[in-house]
Amino acid sequence: MAPPMLRTDLALEKVHQGKVRDLYALPSDGRGERLLLVATDRISAFDVVLDSGIPRKGEVLTRISEFWYRKTQDVVPNGFIAVLDGSNAKEFGVTDRRYFGRSMVMRRAEVLQAECVVRGYLAGSGWKDYQRDMAISGIPLPMGLPLASRLDEPLFTPSRKAEPPEHDTPMTYAELEALVGEDMANALKVRSLALYRFGAQACRERGILMADTKFEFGLIDGEPCLVDEVMTPDSSRFWPADEYQPGREQPSFDKQPLRDYLEALDWDKSPPGPMLPAQIVQQTSERYLEAYRRITGEDLPPSAI
C-alpha cells in the first residue's frame, strides 16, 4: 500500500487548504470556472490535524462523494464534473497518478456561509444541546428521549461556518434566514432534507443508519448547488443497523478507533497531536474502506500508484 498523502504540490494556483482538502484552480472550460478538490489522507481529531495519515482515506472520501453525486443529481443540482483518473488526466492537465482517484473536478461556486446539518437521530452535539435545552437549534423536542433516539422527523439544524481555529456555531432557522434571505434559507432546508431522506433510505437498504450528516451549498449561476464532500464518514455519522440500540453510544464507520485511542491518552487536545501507532492507523483505514463497501456495495477501486 502506498504511503498516505499528507501534502499536495501541484503546479496550479492553490485556492484554499483545509484540514483534509486542498483546492486548486483549473482553467475555465468555456462554461465557467472549475476547481480541483484534492482529498489528502490527513486526519483531524478534536479540531487538531494529526501528523499521522490514514492510507487511502482521501480516495474513500472522493469516491463516496462521487457515488452520491451521481445518485442524487436528479434530486438536487450539484457542481460535480468528474473524478480525476487516467481517462481524463490530460483533459484536466493533471497527469501525476498520485492524484488519481482522490481528486474531484467541480464547478467553482460562491460558497454559502452555512453548514446544512440534518439529524435523524439524537447524537453528537445535538444530544448535548437536547440535554441542556430540550431543543436543537431552537426546535423543541419531547422530554425523556434517550441517547441515539430516532427522531420522528429529520431535523434541519444549520450552523454558521467559521474559519479555523474557530468552531462552527449552531443557528436557528430564523438566523439562517437573516444570513442568506428567506427564499435561499427555504431552498437550503428543502434540498438538505430531500438529500438526507434519499441517502438515509439508500443506506438503510445496505444495513447502515445515517444518524446525521452535513451538506455545503454554493451558488452556481445564482442556483444553490451541492458542493464539497457528500455523505462521507467525515461529514456523516454512520451506524451499523444490526447493532443499533438506543440509550448508548453506537459503533460507527468513521474514525472511532482513533478517537477512542486519543481519549485514553494524557493529551490536552491542543496542537501538536500525538503520533498514532500503526495498529490504530490500520484500524481506522479499515473503517473507512468498510464504509465504502457498505455504502456502494463494491470494493474501493485499486490505487493508481
Image (tube, rainbow, N blue to C red):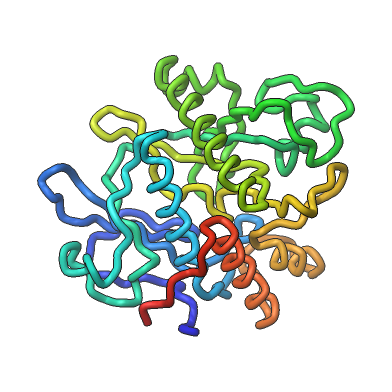
> Could you tell whether 13 is left or right of 159 in the image?
left
> Could you tell whether 58 is left or right of 259 in the image?
left
Q: Is residue 233 above or below residue 163?
A: below
User: Which residue occupies the foreground of this view, 298 or 171?
Assistant: 298
Q: Position of residue 249 (x, y in %)?
A: 81, 50
Q: Position of residue 40 (x, y in %)?
A: 44, 67
Q: Is residue 34 above or below residue 298?
A: above
Name which residue lies at 41% across and 72% down: 7
User: Which residue occupies the foreground of this view, 249 or 277?
Assistant: 249
Q: Is residue 93 above or below residue 67?
A: below
> Could you tell whether 93 is left or right of 153 in the image?
left
Q: Residue furthest left?
A: 30
Q: Position of residue 21 (x, y in %)?
A: 43, 59
Q: How many marks?
A: 0
Name which residue lies at 43% across and 23% down: 187
Q: Position of residue 30 (x, y in %)?
A: 10, 46
Name which residue lies at 50% across and 38% down: 161
Instruction: Tell me which corner region of the image, top left, top right, bottom left or bottom right, holds residue 17.
Output: bottom left
Residue 275 visible in the snapshot: no
> Could you tell whether 6 is left or right of 266 in the image?
left
Residue 232 visible in the snapshot: yes
Name which residue lies at 28% across and 51% down: 81
Quarter of the image where the C terminus is located: bottom left
